Image: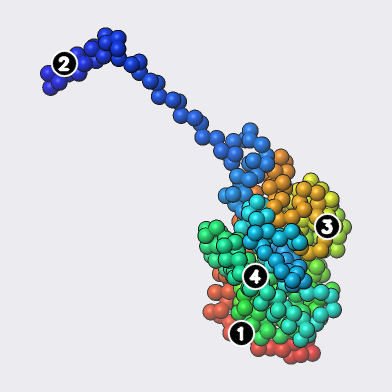
Amino acid sequence: MADLQDELHTTAEVGELDPSAPPPVPLPEPEPDFSPLSDPDAAPLDRAHAILAAHPVADGYSGLPWALRHLPWYDLELGENTVDTDVPRMRRGHVGALFWALHLPEGLAGDRAVGATLEQLDLVKTVARSHPEGLRLAGTAGQVTDARNCGRIAVVLGPASAAAIDDSLAILRVLQSLGLRVLTLAGTSWAGEAGLTRFGEEVVREMNRLGVLADLSGASPATISRAVTISKAPVLCTRSAARALRPHPANLPDETLAELGAARGLCLVPLTAEQTGPSVRDVADHLDHVREIAGPECVGLSGTYDSGIAHPQELGDASCYPNLIAELLHRGWTEPDLALLTWGNVQRALRSADFTAKAAQQRREPSTVRIAELDG
């Protein structure tokens, strides 16, 4: 052992005295790992992109199905400039999931409403399957997550108009079996200004059993209050902002926002100039207000692109979500609250609907009652 130490000592001394030996090269200092996500000094837009890469947008309303219905040809995979939404722009905007609305033009009812909704369901499925590199149909929270993990944008079917079920719980079940996940409770005899009738309440209970979420945007205060009370799953308002800031009929008063928050429902603030205002700052004002009144777990985003309405400045199409997130960062929103806003709250609503349906199916058989039997 002593001989080995002497040898090492001698070698070191020779190296020190040998003028031909190259000087030691100092190892570079490791650079600090500052990503835009963790660096508070990064530009807000850079941080917005980093946050959205980790927590993409679950967009609660897209009018794309009806817009595509009137186009003779389109390619959403490479880009389609005749609409607000295509795969390249959704990827630039970090959209991870999109609810494709099946709403109908005014005046359609009965068999015509059912037929038009079925046609839109068929169209959406055809579009998703013809763009497999970008889109994937999803019906549950798990399927939405799987689509995201596979690099696809999840397509969720709904909301559809209440007229689409033609006062029939059997038609509701058929639509759910075809993939429908959200139904709007407004504009029918059983969900009007006076609130839900007995049949309307039965519709909500059957929706709970099926895992179909109730959309209350445009519904009367009485309908909203009753639906919040009897629904075991979270309710949504897919296109509602704060009425205290902008008195639009579809926007919600503070008392309704508070009621929605207490029930762990979800208010999806639309990016429309008519409901929220002409600038990205106006939209951020509504998001601030909803978060303050209803809580951070009650607020989400609804692009409402391709719905034929004007959008605020800097939010003109599906690629613009980073602009909004940058504005919220400037206002002091934290990453956990932004994660709830963009992705977490919608996923929580979908998971809750799944759990509620599994529990209800063990206790309740499919309802066969007709509207005439309950509402006369």
Report if the CB atoms under discs 2 and 3 are less than 8 Å apart. Answer: no
How many residues crowd mark 3 within 10 Å: few (<14), some (14–19), many (20+)? some
Q: Earlier in the sequence, mark 1 or mark 4?
A: 4
Under mark 2, the amino acid is Asp
Secondary element at image label 1? loop
How many residues crowd mark 2 within 10 Å: few (<14), some (14–19), many (20+)? few
Residue under the point 76% across and 86% down: 111
Quickly name the residue at label 1.
366
How many residues crowd mark 1 within 10 Å: few (<14), some (14–19), many (20+)? few
Quickly name the residue at label 3.
310
Query: Residue 276: x and y, percent?
Result: 82, 54
Most foreground residue, 220 or 116 = 116
Q: Earlier in the sequence, mark 4 or mark 3?
A: 4
Quickly name the residue at label 4.
127
Under mark 1, the amino acid is Pro
Gap in Å between the C-alphas at discs 2 and 4?
A: 78 Å
Query: Residue 212: x and y, percent?
Result: 64, 73
Q: Nearer the viewer, mark 2 or mark 1?
A: 2
The reply to whether residue 40 is in sight is yes
Quickly name the residue at label 2.
6
Residue under the point 63% across and 35% down: 42
Gap in Å between the C-alphas at discs 3 and 1?
A: 42 Å
Most foreground residue, 133 or 101 = 133
Query: Residue 329: x and y, percent?
Result: 69, 42
Q: Is residue 329 above or below residue 316?
A: above
Q: Earlier in the sequence, mark 2 or mark 4?
A: 2
Gap in Å between the C-alphas at discs 2 and 3?
A: 84 Å
Secondary element at image label 3? loop
Under mark 3, the amino acid is Ala
Secondary element at image label 2? helix
Q: Is residue 332 above or below residue 361?
A: above
